[in-house]
Image: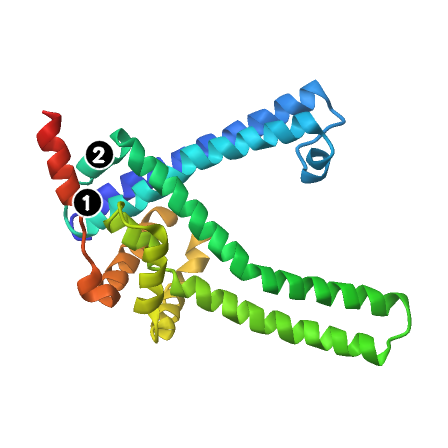
Amino acid sequence: MRGKWGDCISFMLFCFAFVGIFISLELLLKNIFALINPKRTLALRPFLSDGSALILLAVRLILLFTILLPELFVIRRTFIDISHDRDFIRSQRYIRSNGYLQKKSILCTLVFSMLRFFAAVPAMLGAFGIRYFANRTSSRELTSLDLIGFMFSIGFTIVSLGMFFRYCISIAFAPYIMTLNPKANVFDACHLSVRLMDGRHGRYISFLFSFFKFVPLLVLGFPAVVIIPYYITSKIVFVKEQMNNYWQDKLPALIQRWEKYAR
């Protein structure tokens, strides 16, 4: 990070501006929607009963996934280049001119999100069971069967949450593996991440907890332009140390070949 703070802060300001544009568009859409029909809101419940509103929601989600998700890949790649003292402008130019990489970044993010969602399903079912038996006991006298079901739901939810967090930690290296080698298979990257993280969950948790002392500063807002780059670059260094020989950055070779044949 020495000598690169200017690049990190300017890039984070660009990211905040990018997010600010999305928020501004959402607020503008909400106000236009309220002017057209004051009785209709952008809440989720009316969307489920209105066909035109569902189409509008689908368009918003498509725009979100096609514009915002590729930027996550760019951000991760940029900080890898900054932490290794490389020219990140070359990487950004290559990524934005390569439609395959943008499609692959969207696919990878969707796969990672779906894997986490499926891992969270048992915990959600357990939470539903807790709510069901809590409402059941509040509406009538508590029976032994209700008590058994309620206690089982609590235990099942706790165990499922533990398994969910463990799985999320196990595939934490997968996005970095895909960033280093975009042509790799996303499921192979997840499998390799699980292998590399075996027995190292405690180290990863300790690394995350080491940054909790900066959370109060994030409330102030402006320190985020320094804290977030510091966290991302520190995480890259941590991941590289844990991956050891498996850290094989193949994107610079792809960029060099692309620049050679693009002339």
Image coords of residue 87 (percent x, y): 15, 41
Residue drawn where x is 22% and y is 34% of the image = 94
Q: How many marks?
A: 2
Visible residue check, residue 13: yes
Q: Residue at x 30, y 41 (%)?
A: 74
Question: Hey, which quadrant is residue 41 in on the image?
Answer: top right
**Left or right placement of residue 37 versus residue 211 in this view:** right
Q: Which residue is mark 1?
A: 251
Q: For the view shown, which residue lies furthest in the bottom direction?
A: 144
Is any part of residue 220 visible from this angle? no
- Which x, y percent locates residue 191? 35, 62
Q: Secondary structure at mark 2?
A: helix
Q: Position of residue 84 (x, y in %)?
A: 16, 51
Give the image location of residue 85, x and y in percent: 14, 48
Q: Could you tell whether 232 is left or right of 106 in the image? A: left
Residue 252 drawn above or below residue 175? above
Q: Amino acid at mark 2?
A: Tyr
Corner quadrant of residue 136: bottom right
Crowdedness of circle 1 by 10 Å Cα count: few (<14), some, many (20+)?
A: some
- Amino acid type at image mark 1: Leu
- Residue at x 17%, y 64% (from the top left corner): 245
Picture residue at 81% right of the left edge, 64% below the top = 135
Which residue in the structure is indicated by mark 2?
94
**The C terminus - image quarter:** top left
State the SS at label 1. helix
Report the residue that reaches farthest toward the top: 36
Q: Residue furthest right?
A: 140
Mark 2, other Cα within 10 Å: few <14 / some 14–19 / many ≥20: some
Marks 1 and 2 close (CB-CB < 8 Å): yes
